[in-house]
Image (cartoon, coloured by chain):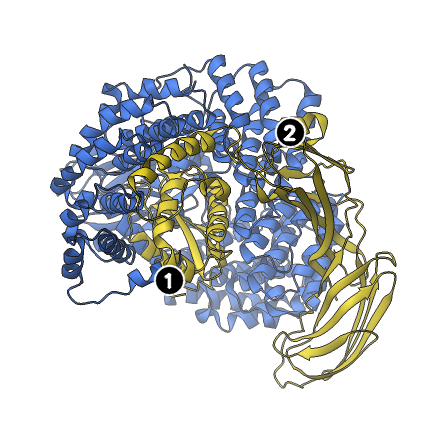
Amino acid sequence: MKGDILIQRTYRDDVERNLAATFRTHILNSREVDNIANLTPVRVLGSCSFMYMRHGDVYILGVTKSNANVMMAFQFMTNVVTLCKAYFGGECSEQSIKNNFVLIYELLDEIMDFGYPQIVDPSILKQYIFQKGFITEAAKAKREAEAQNATLQVTGAVGWRTDNIKYKKNEVFLDIVEQVNMLMSSKGTVLRCDVNGKIVMKVFLSGMPDVKLGLNEKLEDVTFHQCVNLGKFNTEKVVSFVPPDGEFELMKYRCQEGISLPFLVTPLISELGRTRMEVNAKVKAGFGAKDFALNVVITIPVPDTTAKADIHTSIGKAKYDSKKHALVWKVKRFNGATEHSLMASVELIATTRDKKAWSRPPISMSFQVPMYSASGLRVQYLKVWEKSSYKVEKWVRKVCKSGDYSIRT
Amino acid sequence: MSGDGKYFATTKKGEIHELKEELRVLDKSRRKDAVKKVIAAMTVGKDVSPIFPDVVNCMQTDDLELKKLVYLYLINYAKSQPDLAIMAVNTFVKDSQDPNPLIRALAVRTMGCIRVDKITEYLCDPLQRCLKDDDPYVRKTAAVCVAKLYDINPELVEDRGFLDLLKDLLADSNPMVVANAVAALADIRETSSHNLLVLTNQALFKLLRALNECTEWGQVYILDAISKMQISEAKDAESIVERVVPRLQHANSAVVLSAVKVVLLQLPLISDEAAVKALIKKLGPPLVTLLSEEAEVQYVALRNINLIVQKHPEVLSHEIKVFFCKYNDPIYVKLEKLDIMIALANERNIDQVLLELKEYATEVDVDFVRKAVRAIGRCAVTLERAAERCINVLLELIKQKVNYVVQEAVVVIKDIFRRYPNRYESIIATLCDSLDSLDEPEARASMVWIIGEYAERIDNADELLESFLEAFPEENAAVQLQLVTAAVKLFLKNPQPRAQQMIQLVLTYATQETDNPDLRDRAYVYWRLLSSDPEAARAVVLAEKPVISQGTATMDPQLLSTLLGNLSTLSSVYHLPPSAFVTRAAHTPAPSLDNGALRERTTTDDGVAAAAGSSSSGPVSDGAPSSAAAAAQPPSSSSLIGDLLDLDISDPSPAAAAAPVEELVEVMSPQNGKGLGIKAGFSRENNAPVFLLQLANTTQQSLDGFMVQFNKNSHGVAPASQVVQVPPLGPGETAGASVPLTTNPALINPAANPATIQVAIRNNQQGVLYFTSPFKPDILAAPAASPVDDNFFGL
């Protein structure tokens, strides 16, 4: 986090290199605590606009002088991270960038031209950007032919797939991954609840298959991978597409209605004077007896002044985590249609200074429920057409995970 | 693949020399390693331009990777070695005819990035060929290259007919070529003054057709281009909407937001109300979906949603819950969400909103808590029927005795009193309980205002005021001003000896001991009023105050429509018209100087726009304008004082601002300006905002060297150059001048009165004079700045 420039590419003449140094002084080094309005990811310094986001230890910064499309800039930066991960084994860090800087320059040249994003999809780029050394004369001719193919391919209407893919065994994996976000008041009223879901596919199919997916829900709020025919979805409500090869995210959706909550939590935290606190939490599974949850963690914040906590639970293990200032209760497997509870008495260090009341941060919860869908989304059919009409094995899985799942106390 | 990291590890001494040696070896792989080292050195910011010829020598190679590295080097250093760069031309021209389309495209792409005249000349022929290349990949690269060339040499592009070739590409069979041609034309349009082309239906439908097939980014270019077209036929609007609505479901956030923009722009043309309603309903969910992306995307989305709901609250009126803050949202997201919550709050959902706001007011982040309390106040001011509920929440919060919450609550309650006079005064007692904990000027000033305004209802108003007056000399200026006024009110309402004594004390101090001219002048006005005609004083000071309007600062409709036409762009994030921060097209003189000055300003955080570069022009300070300004104008007010002012003589500017801009207003009479009379006003000339000055010299000497500077203001307006273009002004002469303006978000002071700008003007003979000029923000968003005025696309 020294703020050194890892790699930089100037696409237009009007922005100078030393501006990135300006960024370092103004954004990384200054805390600007007194003016939080300045902490935004889009800012003006001098005559330039700076747009930045952070990924681990790497900042990705875009600088422009014009009235650029800022949403496109951020989407592009997100895609660049995805691209680096796809090329460098799932990692986009200072080290992986330094180790691959030649390739990254090559990619940067390809994915943007004069400030306009071009082809950023890793599966497409991998068809013609790879690092290879010297070429013999024979290989050169072959390369030219390949290049011609690639250019036609990547600029074509189905740019994300080549037609010469072959598999012995044709398989499709479809995963419905849902994230439940919930905010409950201390009185047990659900203040906000939504499911952010996505369908991730792994496609190992030969040729140019046409895939149709039927879903039970009338999805209103949904976005699709570029391979999906949006016009068709709009008119016929069928998800129809020619899939890219391998893994990709077919669609994302969000729903707020008809959600079955996986867990209900009833907390009772009473502050007894200035040195003692009683914590009582009941957790009830909202799913049926045939389902179960894994890796359930319930984090119950306690004041910074906590000295020790005496905790009893009806299942799993719980302890006081002094770094997080919270009681952390872990349950490896939580069976459906059951209820468990935690009781703790917490001792606080009496402080002399007259501090303000404890802010009572919300209880948070993380979990995974396999083969459960909080939104009730189901796959009704998944059909594959290909001119050679081969046999396809199809696999559908579901998993429900916790997103921001919190309960105010 | 890994291990390029080693190229960064270099020996410090004689590095350049070593690289030179290595570049000359015959072994291909060692040479390539050397080039990699050069690029690594370039990456970390070392100047490797001295070995230019040696690197360029490696250019002619079959190794594509090596070629790309050399090209990259050229892009970076050609400008510094223009004479040597010409060495590369032959290879470029040869590469542009290579059988491999990737190499042809690479050559054209790179040549366009080298801004050296000699190279540019040689670019034309290859570019012409590549625009007609059989390979779409080459054509799409060439299309962008035309925009690059236009940026370097517009005449050349026009002379060689590249614009027509580019237009031909709009009809290309390949969607990606079409998209890049659109992007290039839009780019050229930004800087050109031409209105070359007229939109035809045919062109529009070609674009709409390409929209379905091209890449996600191409869709953005096409959508943005459509958003800048002038559509006037209802049936065109309908077919646009029909094609664009499916894009709302794209996974790419930029496609979604640009699609929203295009749909919104067509709405006024669609006469079928049911259809409009259905469309508006379709816009909500995609916007909400953007809020589940990365925080940065959320931020951009929220700034845009803020604009959209000002025009069409019904898009998201049922979705207020999604704007409730999550505990872990970054602070900048939380603050934006609060604004939208306030905008969407209505009588149906106010209870829910208040519950949320109350929850936020107990969080740890002080700034967020404060804003939450302010939000409760804003709800009270806008929603009359909910005002009482809002006040109850505020009272509950005050009772929790968290210091900054109490202070913030006092400030908003003052606004509530001004909105609903004589309705909620029963809560004053609760406020008085927290008196001791108030240590911030704004809260103290608000409390003092309340005590003065309701002196007759507070039994011990005199005691309370006295407790404030004990430390009068140490108080912040805003509090002092309020104390003077409150003391006068107390006296007029109840002229008993104690109050008389108090007022004597305060006025004596304020007129004799202070060096704050605002305070002194106000004290003098009161003193004279009280001593000459107490009845008049009563009529003035205790006059019925106008009820403040709804608290939400509504945006100027014209600005709002400009911003809605620019959704998804920086303009929509800053809430400023593009002309306010894009200097490129405006061609302001000496941009580098301007740069330096602005950067300087961002580093000073004392709220004063330091006039960097020419210190003699004198910064205009926020708190204490010089006596000259104070004499010419009633106390210039920050928004706080503005809210609290009792004397409505304070601000002549709203009336003055309403006058036509051509009529300059006298901002300084010769008596007050040491013999220099100034009339000033804001207007537009040649589609750009200007500050007009008329200077009348009534002194006995000649005046010259006029310079001008603005204080930070509501719109971040500043002179493009501080020098006023006016000839030396002889005795008795009068001259006019117009000062071009720019805007810069760094110079915005949101608290400043939007109807005025504080100006400092200097000349070599008289030094600095200060005055306040009426200001009309409309001059920034003239019709010409509207994005839909000329039709660039078409065939």
Report crowding for label 1: few under 14, some 14 to 19, many 20 or more residues within 10 A (C-alpha).
some
Task: Kindly identify the amino acid type of the residue bearing the numbered disc 1.
Answer: Gly
Residue B786 vertical position relative to residue A370 in the rendered view, above or below: above
Task: Kindly identify the amino acid type of the residue bearing the numbered disc 2.
Answer: Ser
**Marks 2/1 same chain:** yes
Q: Colour of chain B?
A: blue
Q: Quadrant of residue B243?
A: top right
Q: Secondary structure at mark 1?
A: loop
Residue B398 vertical position relative to residue B593 in the rendered view, above or below: below
User: Quadrant of the image for the N terminus of chain A?
Assistant: bottom left
Classify residue B146 as left or right of residue B328.
Answer: left
Please give the name of the residue rendered at 35% of the width and 17% of the height, measured from the top-left corner.
Answer: B196
Asked if the residue at tag 1 contacts the one at tag 2, i.e. Cβ–Cβ closer than 8 Å, the answer is no
Q: Colour of chain A?
A: yellow
Q: Quadrant of residue A407?
A: bottom right
B359 or B520: nearer the viewer: B359
Classify residue B120 as left or right of residue B419.
Answer: left
Disc 1: host chain: A
The residue at which mark 1 appears reads as A3
Q: Position of residue A3 (x, y in %)?
A: 37, 62
User: Quadrant of the image for the C terminus of chain A?
Assistant: bottom right
Classify residue A304 as left or right of residue A71.
Answer: right
The residue at which mark 2 appears reads as A388
Q: Position of residue B478 (x, y in %)?
A: 47, 60
A386 or B389: nearer the viewer: A386
